[in-house]
Amino acid sequence: ETGVTQSPTHLIKTRGQQVTLRCSSQSGHNTVSWYQQALGQGPQFIFQYYREEENGRGNFPPRFSGLQFPNYSSELNVNALELDDSALYLCASSLDSGLDGYTFGSGTRLTVV
Amino acid sequence: AQSVTQPDIHITVSEGASLELRCNYSYGATPYLFWYVQSPGQGLQLLLKYFSGDTLVQGIKGFEAEFKRSQSSFNLRKPSVHWSDAAEYFCAVGLHHSNYQLIWGAGTKLIIKP
């Protein structure tokens, strides 16, 4: 059973650029949730995808967008990067509602300069 | 608005000593409650969860937590810590009525003294 894989592990972008982060969900999981974790804080919910549809969204602007593919992998896209977007981006997969708990990836560390 | 409070940013305990990490939540109904652990460079790992039933739940690595409705608390405990327990611990609340997102506390960093 494979876990959740995120790529890349680290990247540095310039303010105003666009970035795409990728997540491969655990085998058998059909739900992917994305979280932003700023330094010294708990994760903040960005959005969730269930069977290729957005299933809920947190308090993030529209420049944060996502996709889920038929194999349940997912992408997080962030346009017009701002310095405050620097954070660890975590992907978590789960089965349906995720009540049994998520399986998290190790995250992508994004630095915006 | 729903919120989760972990009042201790850092806790230092001696190896072999007991541990209690505090978590309080603000939510209108009984939420789903979770404790996760995050080690440097690693993702979040689920320690234990509470959905309903027995208010004392057992988790992995010798951890347990007790749900107290009257105090809106879900404190994490371990009778004897090991150096490998040094990590950051997060309490989270699941909003089961909507889109199943988790609301997280700010975390407590556990430091183990030899």
Image (tube, rainbow, N blue to C red):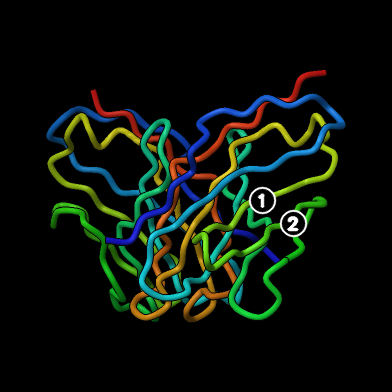
According to the picture, the residue beneath numbered tag 1 turns out to be B76
The quarter of the rendered structure image containing the C terminus of chain B is top right
Which chain is disc 1 placed on?
Answer: B
* Disc 1: CA contacts within 10 A as few (<14), some (14-19) or many (>=20): many
Does residue A58 appear to the left or right of B47 in the view shown?
left
Q: Residue furthest front?
A: B70
Q: Secondary structure at mark 1?
A: strand
Q: Is residue B54 above or below residue A5?
A: below
* Disc 2: CA contacts within 10 A as few (<14), some (14-19) or many (>=20): many
- What amino acid does circle 2 point to? Glu
Does residue B46 appear to the left or right of A66 in the view shown?
right
Q: Residue furthest top?
A: B114
Q: Residue at x 41, y 75 (%)?
A: B29
Q: Secondary structure at mark 2?
A: strand
According to the picture, the residue beneath numbered tag 2 turns out to be B64
Does residue B62 appear to the left or right of B46 in the view shown?
right
- Mark 1–mark 2 CB contact (< 8 Å): yes
- Same chain, marks 1 and 2? yes
Q: Earlier in the sequence, mark 1 or mark 2?
A: 2
